[in-house]
Image (cartoon, grey):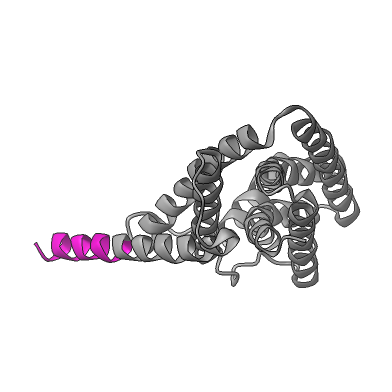
Amino acid sequence: MNLYVLVASFLASSVEFVEALSIVLAAVAFGFRPALRGVLYAVLTLAVLVLVLGEGILRFVPMSVLQGIVGVLLLLFGLKWIRKAILRFAGLKALHNEEQAYARQVQKMESSGQGAFEAQATAFNGVLLEGLEVVVIILTMGSGAHAFGSAILGSAIGLVAVLALGFALRSPLSRVPENTLKFVVGIMLTSFGTFWAGKALGVRWPLSEATLLVLIAGYLAVAAWYVKMLKAGVARHEVG
């Protein structure tokens, strides 16, 4: 069991599932069972993708090459999330609002007069589209550390937790600090990407996997500095 991979997969997957939940709950308003079937079919589809692609990656791609590819992918993925989070916390980009996303989806379904079949299709599409990013996370995290079990378990825990809370509350998880989670996940994915890309290039990290903690702290400090500098720039612009 790789705890680093499990936690990172759990957090990253939870963020994606929170976004999918708004679409699913909108579908639930037009039929609980059809929406639940749509979620189940989407999860099964994603599970097949993970099993098929995961087995193929490990069988045909050398580990050194795999770690390099995974490192670059995670760097790109993580830096994109960090950039968006920095802009949001600096006040230069609107914060994501799950209640608004839920309201838009309900309005869309009401205006089109959709029924049970459409509710199932909407839930399926929502989970599948957001879940594809989860598949990428599982494949990259699991293959890079050779810990598919930990990556799958982390994502599964995230899915169960988000679905349980969502269906229990029957409302978007607007109180979940999603933007903060994206910030944290972006830091973690970028740190993993740096670690594995370095290993692929022959870098010998002095603290082995514990180096990840140092990388996380470093990226967090740099991101916080950027937020502070951008906020100061916005304040000067408003005063001027």
- Image point 52% across, 42% down: which residue? 197
| Most frequent secondary structure within the magenta stretch | helix
Drawn side of residue 26 relative to residue 39, left or right: left
Pick whichever, 65 or 75, lies toward us.
65
Tell me if residue 5 comes above or below residue 171 in the rendering.
above
Drawn side of residue 169 relative to residue 116, left or right: left
Pick whichever, 138 or 103, lies toward us.
138
Drawn side of residue 64 relative to residue 81, left or right: right
- Image point 79% across, 43% down: which residue? 124
Task: Give the quadrant of residue 163.
Answer: bottom right
Q: Quadrant of the C terminus?
A: bottom left
Tell me if residue 154 comes above or below residue 117 in the rendering.
below
- The answer to whether residue 111 is visible is no
**Outermost residue toward the left?**
240
Instruction: Find residue 223 and report its horizontal and vertical position in percent.
Output: 37, 60
Drawn side of residue 50 relative to residue 65, left or right: right
- Image point 52% across, 61% down: which residue? 211
- The answer to whether residue 225 is visible is yes
Q: Is 54 in the magenta?
A: no
Q: Quadrant of the N terminus?
A: bottom right
**Range drawn in magenta:** 227-240
Task: Give the quadrant of residue 6.
Answer: bottom right
Tell me if residue 167 comes above or below residue 12 in the rendering.
below
- Image point 63% across, 59% down: which residue? 8
Instruction: Find residue 2 and report its horizontal and vertical position in percent.
Output: 72, 60
Pick whichever, 116 or 126, lies toward us.
126
Instruction: Find residue 38 and report its horizontal and vertical position in percent.
Output: 84, 45
Q: How many marks?
A: 0
Q: Is 238 in the magenta?
A: yes
Instruction: Find residue 74 and report its horizontal and vertical position in percent.
Output: 55, 44
Task: Give the quadrant of residue 93.
Answer: bottom left
